[in-house]
Image: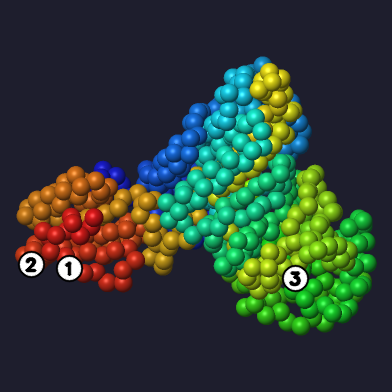
């Protein structure tokens, strides 16, 4: 590709709408443009990267025996009424009417549609197991679209759904998907962890999330270095109403609710020893509210030791004490955090109430801490692992190693759904005895478009993106100096371009009439892994200048060896 025919859409200024580095760089490098909140156009350069992610995902899903299909984006309300989610899903579901006033939604996920396919197409246990997948546009009307493609409203997901006659078969496919995901994220060149996850509002009995480790992550994950233990400390999704959002900076006041009374009662007991409790509370709270932010409820007469920020990486230090008579929550920004944020009052109140109630309840049994309060409205909560009380450096629940608590970006999620959907939609096949048997199901998602942002969070420097090679839109950039002044140089450049292309590289030839500084800055910003500079002077010496994107300095490579060198 030549830049004259593949124009770069780089920007010099950091766009003010972008809070985190990947979002800034995706805009500055000309990968995406915003259309409206949570809606993005993938420009040609960005689309090349997105397609690379898709290709790796597709190859590994195919290799794991999954079958690709493509379901409609628009789904009829009747199916969602059958599963019970038309009522339950809340405002994240974009609902539409057609010209006959029939109700539809734009699919945020496809359990209903695939279960409908299964009940129509599958007759016998002999057709099982089956694993269908698609790579497709989803829509979720996220309460707070942000971070560009990382939390968009319209985004690309790979979603797979497997069908089984029994649990043993489901287990087997689940393991195979776990392995496929491990391969995918490894091939993508990402630093990731698979963690045990709460099944949240989806229901079912086993689930793992795959997280790319990055400070901008909205989840907190705990894992033991050197051990097997890894879990998400995110608890459940909350879908508050839009009008429940507080104004930025507005202090949060507890209303007269049972939670408020619990808090009041429990805070009374907090006199001594308080330090660990408060530390834990802060860690928990800042993790729960996401984005490196701190929500804390304190009463004015407690003198707390200042908490050491370096021990608690996600935690903010400015604590604000409320009036003696009043309990307030304070939202503050911590080191490495993203600045002040809007948070739904009921969520903070509920979360803190639950956390405090949890300490007060003291329901530690055999090191397992079960959490019985339905603290996020309308979200059924199962028991969760003992993570509420842990802080960085605590022993792992399995006794192997000490816990690290870091931020993660959820890029994949696998669930054993069991019979939740197949029962509601009555999806059965005939078993060995010729009797109808309800299908067992698994589902497996990957945030294809989110991965592009997550990869940049992990791979950038002050000059721009540093693509892992498998994701790079082009592997090699040719940057000629004063191309338009020299016939000899033009010929050498064309030769090199042809040779490298024939050798299988994706090459970007910068044939613009711009200063070398401008050219280099653009090529570094868009993150091309290898840069080759050709000049008259280099030709005289029979050399090209080579610089890897991570290298501090360029070096000379004999022209004759260049293709071999780059392989
Ligand atoms: P999150 O916790 O980030 O809201 P989720 O748990 O709601 O994600 P899933 O239902 O598990 O998401 O969907 C599968 C995958 O789709 C997620 O692991 C994530 O990578 C991706 N994804 C979910 N929501 C978005 C979004 N708003 N924008 C981009 N990708 C998303
Ligand atoms: Mg979500
Ligand atoms: Mg999630
Ligand atoms: Mg998920």
Query: What quarter of the picture does the N terminus occupy?
Result: top left
SS type, badge 3: helix
The local secondary structure at tag 1 comes to strand
Q: Residues within 10 Å of mark 2 (few under 14, many from 20)?
A: few
The x, y position of residue 420, in whole percent, is 72, 34
Image quadrant holding the C terminus, namely bottom left
Q: Is residue 313 visible?
A: yes
Q: Which mark is on residue 556?
A: 1
Q: Is mark 3 within 8 Å of ligand 3?
A: no
Instruction: Give the alpha-carbon distance from disc 3 to disc 1, as whole Å.
Output: 55 Å
Mark with earlier residue (2, 1):
2
Please give left or right for residue 203 compared with residue 313 in the image: right
Structural distance between the alpha carbons of marks 2 and 1: 10 Å
Q: CA distance from mark 2 to mark 3?
A: 64 Å
Residue under pointer 2: 541
Q: Residue at x 68, y 64 (%)?
A: 398
Are dots 2 and 1 in contact, CB under 8 Å? yes
Choose the circle earlier in sequence order: 2 or 3.
3
Mark 3 lies on residue = 280
Task: Count neighbours of disc 1 (C-alpha within 10 A) and say few if under 14, some if 14 to 19, many if 20 or more.
Answer: some
Badge 3: residue crowd in 10 Å (few <14, some 14–19, many ≥20): many
Q: Position of residue 240 (x, y in %)?
A: 75, 47
| Ligand 1 within 8 Å, label 1 CB | no
């Amino acid at each position: 590709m030549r830049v004259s025919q593949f124009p770069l859409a780089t920007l010099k200024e950091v766009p003010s709408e972008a809070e985190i580095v990947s979002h800034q760089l995706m805009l500055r490098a000309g990968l995406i443009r915003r259309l409206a909140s949570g809606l993005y156009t993938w420009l040609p350069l960005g689309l090349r990267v997105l397609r690379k992610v898709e290709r790796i995902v597709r190859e590994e899903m195919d290799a794991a025996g999954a079958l690709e299909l493509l379901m409609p984006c628009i789904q009829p309300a009747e199916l969602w009424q059958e599963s019970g989610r038309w009522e339950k899903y809340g405002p994240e579901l974009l609902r539409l009417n057609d010209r006959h006033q029939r109700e539809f939604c734009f699919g945020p996920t496809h359990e209903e549609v695939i279960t409908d396919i299964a009940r129509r197409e599958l007759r016998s246990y002999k057709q099982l197991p089956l694993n269908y997948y698609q790579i497709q546009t989803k829509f979720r009307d996220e309460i707070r679209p942000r971070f560009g493609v990382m939390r968009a409203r319209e985004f690309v997901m790979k979603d797979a759904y497997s069908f089984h006659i029994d649990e043993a078969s489901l287990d087997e496919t689940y393991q195979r998907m776990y392995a496929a995901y491990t391969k995918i994220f490894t091939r993508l060149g990402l630093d990731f962890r698979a963690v045990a996850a709460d099944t949240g509002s989806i229901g079912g009995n086993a689930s793992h999330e795959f997280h790319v480790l990055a400070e901008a992550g909205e989840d907190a994950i705990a894992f033991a270095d050197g051990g097997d233990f890894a879990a998400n400390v995110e608890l459940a999704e909350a879908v508050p109403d839009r009008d429940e959002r507080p104004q930025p900076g507005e202090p949060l006041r507890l209303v007269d609710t049972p939670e408020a009374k619990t808090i009041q009662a429990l805070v009374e007991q907090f006199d001594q020893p308080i330090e660990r409790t408060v530390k834990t509370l802060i860690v928990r709270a800042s993790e729960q509210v996401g984005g490196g932010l701190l929500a804390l409820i304190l009463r004015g007469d407690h003198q707390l030791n200042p908490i050491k920020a370096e021990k608690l990486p996600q935690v903010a230090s400015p604590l604000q004490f409320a009036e003696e008579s009043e309990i307030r929550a304070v939202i503050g920004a911590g080191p490495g955090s993203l600045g002040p944020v809007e948070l739904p009052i009921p969520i903070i109140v509920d979360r803190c109430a639950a956390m405090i109630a949890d300490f007060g309840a003291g329901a530690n049994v055999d090191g397992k801490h079960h959490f019985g309060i339905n603290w996020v409205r309308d979200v059924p909560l199962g028991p969760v692992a003992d993570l509420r009380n842990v802080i960085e450096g605590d022993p792992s629940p399995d006794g192997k190693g000490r816990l690290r608590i870091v931020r993660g970006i959820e890029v994949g999620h696998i669930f054993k759904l069991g019979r939740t959907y197949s029962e509601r939609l009555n999806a059965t096949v005939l078993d060995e005895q010729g009797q109808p048997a309800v299908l067992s199901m698994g589902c497996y998602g990957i945030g294809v478009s989110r991965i592009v942002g997550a990869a940049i969070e992990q791979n950038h420097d002050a000059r721009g993106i540093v693509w892992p090679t498998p994701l790079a839109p082009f592997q090699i950039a040719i940057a000629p100096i004063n191309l338009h002044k020299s016939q000899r140089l033009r010929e050498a450049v064309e030769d090199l371009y042809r040779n490298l292309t024939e050798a299988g590289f994706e090459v970007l030839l910068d044939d613009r009439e711009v200063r070398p500084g401008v050219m280099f800055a653009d090529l570094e910003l868009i993150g091309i892994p290898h840069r080759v500079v050709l000049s008259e002077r280099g030709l005289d010496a029979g050399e090209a200048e080579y610089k890897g994107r991570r290298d501090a300095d360029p070096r000379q490579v004999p022209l004759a060896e260049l293709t071999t060198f780059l392989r």
